[in-house]
Each structure stands twice: as C-alpha cells, then as structure tokens.
C-alpha cells in the first residue's frame, strides 16, 4: 500500500477536562478502524481554547487512553504536554501520517509541538492571510455588545441569528482597508470566513448524504480575538496537513461539517489559483450515534450534578432541619455556591462531589477516570463501549449475538458499515456484569495484580496495610473475594475487618447474642468454644498454614463440628458473621491481632 492510500484516523480531544466515556469510544473506533485497514492512528491535542485548556487535562487524557490500551502511532508521547514541548521537551515527530507540506509549513511540524494546536499558530495564520488576500476571509470589528444587540433583534423577530456580511465585504475581493486596520493592532477583531452561496452535501458513512442548504451557514469566525483559530479552522487545516483520511466523531459534530467542507473548498481554490499550498481533500466522514442514559436523557457530565442535587433534596425533605447552608457547612463548601447548585443555577462538580461525600451517595461514572476509580478493568470498558453504536453482527453457537470480545477482535472485525444510526444506550447494569464476569474469569494471580495496582493508585493506605501480608495469603484472599466483586472497589467491604485497628473493631450485638451467648443444639455456648480456641492459638508459635488443622482438632476435641467453633471465632475477629474462610482470615490477621480481638470479644460477652 502506498503512503497516499494509507488510512489515517485521528482522535482530537480538547484538553478541557477528563476524558469522557463517549470520547473514549471515539478514540477506540478511530484506533480500531486504523488497525483494521492497516493504517495509522493519531492523537492531536486541540488546545486552542486558551481559557479552558490545561496541561493537566491533556496529560490525563493521554494517560486514560494508555490505560485503556488504545495505543497511538502518532501524537505526543504519553507524558508530554504543550508546556514540555514549549520548553523543548520530547514528543514523537509527526511521522508517516504527515504529508510533506513543503518548506513553508515544514519547520513548524518538527518536534512534538506539531500535535498541539496551540503551537501551530504560524501555520493557521499563514493560511488565514492567504484567505484574506484572496477575498475569502476578512477582519470583523463588531464588539460583543453590538453582536448581542443583533442577536436580540433576531430573536425578537423570531429569526435565527445570522451574522450579516458587512456591505464593504465583497467575496473574492481583498479588503485591504480592513486588513490594514486589523494589522494596526489597535482594535480587537476576529477573522470571518466568506461563506459562498453553495449547498453543501456531506457524504457520511453512517448517515448517508446529508444536505445543508446554501444560506444555512453564515460568515463564521475562523480566528478569535485572542489570535487563536477556532475549532472549525484548525481542524480543517490539520486534518489536511496531517493526512487524515477518515474522520470518525460523535454526531454532535455533524452540523459543523458543512463549515469544514466549505473551508476545504475555499482552500482548494487557493491552491488551484496558485496562491497557497495544495488542494484540500475532504476526508471520509462517519458520525457516530449519540450515547443516552437508559432514562432517555443524553449522557453528559451534568448527570453527576443531577444525581447529587437529587440526593441533597431528598435529604432535606427527610430532615427539615437541614438547609442548603447547613449542608454547605458540613461539606466544607461555599454556601452561596451550594444554594445556587440546589436551585439548578450551577452544575459545579466540586459541589456535586462534596455533597455526595457528605451524604454517602456515589455519583454516576461519566469520565474514564471515574470508571478507573470505581475499579473497572480497561478490557471491560473497551468491550462495553465498542458496543455503543457498533456490533460485530455475529452469532455464538447458541444463537446469541457475539458481545464479549477483546480489542484484538475489534481490530480484526471493526467496520464503518456496522455503525448504527440510532442512539446508543448506556446500560450500566450490563457494564457492571461485563466487569464482574471479567474479574471472575481472571486467575488468582491476575486478579491480585489488578487489585494491587488499583489499591496502589486509589487506596494507597490500604495497599500499604496489605504490604505486610504474605503472598500466599494474598493469593488466597484474592481467590476468596474475586467472586464477590463486581468492581474492584467492592473489595474494600470484604477486607474492612483487616483494615481497622483491633481496638476499633465494632461488634454486631446480634451476632454476639446468636453465635456466642445462645446455647447450640448440643447445649454448649459459642463463648465457651471461643475460650478454648483462644488457648489453642495462644499455644502456637505463629498462625500459619497449619491453622486449619489446629481448628479441626480443637473442634474434634470438644466433640463438635468445625462450624460450631468457626462461627464464634469469626464474630470475634471480624465483628460479624461474614468473613473470608476462617483459617485464611486468621492467617492474614496474625497471632497478636487474633488474640487481641478474641479478648475484646470475650470482654463483651
Ligand atoms: N476537539 C474536538 C472535540 O473534542 C474534536 C472534534 C472532531 O473530531 O473534529 O470535540
């Protein structure tokens, strides 16, 4: 395959927050399509919104993609950010996916800088000047207040606002006066594109032909007053210069596409007139279905705010002494912000998280980071999101649809023709069951590795506490809790008894009554068995793998079944009637803790 036939896809996140699960799907599909077609997959950081972009967010997005196992051929290296690049740091040089665009643009592309749009202003500005000189773009000087008045007038007249092209702007004629005025630098201005009066037909691999009538698009802004290009402009320039052949993105970008096609046409004319560059190609477009919650609302970052607001309102309804101000005080939040949040005037994520913590509710996971924190495995996530709008269209031998697969399968079978048109449904129950199935299918070793990595990242204190537990015990523990975890976070409930100090263990009174104080069928009480077992344990050098046998012998010696002594012991060391197997529990606790807990329990009997 020659380089010019090579498929090039790109994922182009704006680094303004965490990687949304919908963004992860876009990245996955772009990756899978490139793999399937033997092409290249690129990451480009669209950081032209200076106020909202951050290095931290860019780094987080790259890290989430790497965690998901979505590897890119071209783009910044994992840890590189725009600032690192500015400081002369690493980043892979744009590779085979970048068409040679000639010496005019070439130097800017050297180094990792090429993948950060904010580092490419010279390139955009050069094209903008060419467009202005060709009469295809012009500086516009209206103030925000003037534009607002025009917008209001349109609303009052029940019309959609469209920027009225100034009378002195003639398509195809260079407006030197405006350009000089802009260059003088004294007045804030934007650059607008002269939209010609042609219909635009977007050919979309998923949606078919989508026609946008002439006049639907006004002279939109291509460079903002801060000197940065708009998304529309930068995306068109970069998709061309970086040789992108296929644009797969969410359906909310469909309405942007006629603007992009109009720009491609104008830039192509520039090339044909010999003014600049080479003709721009229109990539293949594939707009993917939107992702909806099962309740029918579009899945969005606001879902967290919605759910925290609901929980807070319920708490206030239950306890009328609670007010927004008391909630704010207890959660350590700003009272005004909380009042505004409850009145739906803001969707502050900080307030949502603070209230959720206070009220003990968990917020719906939306970003990849949220799912990581909850303890989902990357393989479960990629499997699940691959099915959001795509399906392999294959059957298992029992006739059911093939739904469980890994990314290698996806890379082998992914195709644009099987992307659906209807909205995808984000079924959390299904995702949870995918994750639970995957956890349970892991060997004890692999579960332990995944669990340990998760603890180290999200529960470092627990991870440190388990460092003193031997590997053999940890493997047994892994085997015991693996079956009971749907997500890795569930593990915390199952090991809580190991994490609290002996002196802090709380006892369930009912369990003490039932398993220690009430006489069993044989007339003996659990507390008496416990006293006897205490002596056996006190006589051991240490609790090791022989403890099961010791307990069996103790039970036999007292003429009872193992369960008769195991259950009182379990209550003594765990506080309640449920724990991993008793011998394992004692091995993990060790002799000193076991005895201390038995003594505390006996003190309560
Ligand atoms: N930066 C845009 C976004 O994050 C990219 C859209 C596109 O793929 O063209 O939505």
Image (tube, helix red, strand yellow):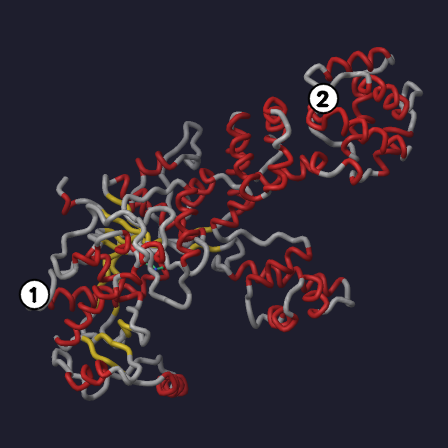
Q: Which mark is residue 272?
A: 1
Query: Mark 1 or mark 2, which has the lower sequence index?
Result: 1
Quadrant where the image shows the C terminus: top right
Rendered location of residue 498, percent (x, y)? 70, 34
| Disc 2: CA contacts within 10 A as few (<14), some (14-19) or many (>=20) | some
Helix, strand or loop at disc 1? helix
**In this rendering, position of residue 242 left or right of residue 85:** left
10 over 484 or under it: above or below: below
Q: Quadrant of ligand 1?
A: bottom left
Q: Nearer the viewer, residue 181 or 293?
A: 181
Q: What is the x, y in percent for residue 119? A: 28, 61
Relative to 417, say whether 252 is above or below.
below
The CA distance from mark 1 to mark 2 is 81 Å
Q: Return the mark for residue 78.
A: none
Question: Which quadrant holds residue 6?
Answer: top left
Furthest toward the front, the residue is: 87
Is residue 221 something one can see in this rendering?
yes
Q: Nearer the viewer, residue 220 or 73?
A: 73
Residue in the picture at 28% in, 68% down: 229
- Residue under pointer 2: 583
Left or right: residue 266 versus residue 74 is left
**Image position, residue 193 (x, y; %):** 22, 74
Quarter containing the N terminus: top left
600 w.r.t. 235: above or below: above
Indicate the position of residue 419 as horizontal and vertical percent values: 34, 48
**Residue 287 in view:** no
- Between 298 and 188, which is closer to the camera in this rendering? 188
């Amino acid at each position: 395959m020659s380089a010019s036939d090579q498929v090039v896809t790109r994922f182009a996140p704006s680094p303004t927050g965490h990687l949304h699960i919908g963004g992860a799907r876009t990245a996955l599909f772009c990756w899978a399509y490139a793999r399937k077609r033997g092409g290249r997959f690129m990451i480009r950081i669209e950081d032209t919104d200076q106020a909202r972009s951050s290095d931290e967010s860019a780094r987080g997005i790259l890290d989430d993609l790497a965690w998901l196992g979505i590897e890119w051929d071209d783009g910044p290296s994992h840890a590189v950010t725009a600032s690192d690049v500015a400081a002369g740091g690493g980043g892979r040089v744009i590779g085979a996916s970048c068409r040679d665009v000639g010496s005019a643009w070439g130097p800017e592309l050297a180094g990792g800088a090429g993948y950060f749009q904010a580092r490419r202003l010279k390139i955009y500005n050069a094209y903008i000047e060419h467009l202005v000189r060709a009469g295809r773009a012009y500086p516009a000087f209206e103030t925000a207040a003037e534009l607002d008045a025009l917008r209001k007038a349109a609303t009052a007249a029940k019309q959609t606002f469209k920027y009225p092209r100034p009378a002195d702007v003639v398509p195809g004629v260079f407006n030197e006066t405006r350009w000089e005025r802009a260059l003088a630098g004294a007045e804030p201005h934007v650059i607008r594109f002269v939209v010609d009066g042609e219909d635009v037909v977007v050919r979309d691999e998923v949606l078919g032909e989508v026609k946008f009538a002439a006049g639907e698009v006004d002279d939109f802004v291509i460079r903002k007053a801060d000197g940065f290009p708009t998304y529309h402009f930068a995306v068109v320039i970069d998709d061309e210069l970086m040789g992108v052949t296929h644009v797969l993105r969410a359906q909310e970008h469909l309405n942007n596409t006629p603007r992009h096609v109009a720009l491609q046409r104008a830039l192509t004319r520039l090339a044909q007139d010999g003014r600049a560059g080479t003709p721009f190609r229109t990539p293949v477009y594939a707009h993917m279905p939107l992702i909806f919650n099962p309740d029918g609302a579009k899945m969005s970052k606001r879902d967290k705010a919605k759910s925290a607001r609901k929980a807070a309102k319920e708490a206030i309804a239950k306890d009328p002494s609670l007010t927004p101000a008391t909630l704010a005080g207890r959660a350590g939040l700003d009272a005004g912000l909380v009042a505004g949040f409850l009145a739906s005037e803001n969707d502050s994520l900080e307030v949502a998280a603070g209230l959720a913590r206070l009220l003990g509710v968990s917020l719906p996971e939306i970003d990849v980071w949220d799912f990581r924190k909850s303890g989902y495995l990357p393989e479960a996530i990629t499997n699940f999101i691959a099915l959001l709008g795509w399906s392999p269209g294959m059957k298992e031998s029992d006739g059911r649809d093939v739904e469980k697969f890994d990314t290698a399968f996806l890379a082998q079978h992914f195709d644009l023709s099987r992307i659906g048109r209807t909205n995808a449904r984000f079924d959390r129950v299904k995702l949870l069951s995918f994750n639970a199935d995957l956890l349970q299918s892991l060997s004890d070793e692999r579960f332990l590795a995944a669990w340990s990595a998760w603890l180290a990242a999200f529960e470092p204190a627990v991870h440190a506490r388990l460092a003193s537990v031997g590997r053999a015990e940890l493997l047994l523990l892994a085997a015991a809790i693996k079956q009971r975890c749907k997500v890795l976070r569930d593990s915390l409930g199952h090991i809580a008894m190991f994490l609290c100090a002996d002196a802090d263990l709380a006892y369930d009174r009912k369990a003490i009554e039932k398993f220690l104080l009430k006489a069993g069928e044989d007339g003996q009480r659990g507390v008496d068995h416990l006293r006897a077992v205490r002596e056996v344990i006190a006589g051991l050098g240490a609790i090791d793998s022989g403890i099961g046998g010791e307990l069996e012998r103790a039970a036999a010696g007292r003429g009872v079944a193992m369960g008769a002594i195991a259950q009182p012991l379990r209550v003594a060391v765990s506080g309640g009637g449920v724990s991993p197997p008793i011998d394992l529990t004692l091995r993990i606790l060790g002799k000193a803790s076991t005895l201390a807990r038995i003594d505390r329990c006996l003190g309560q009997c």
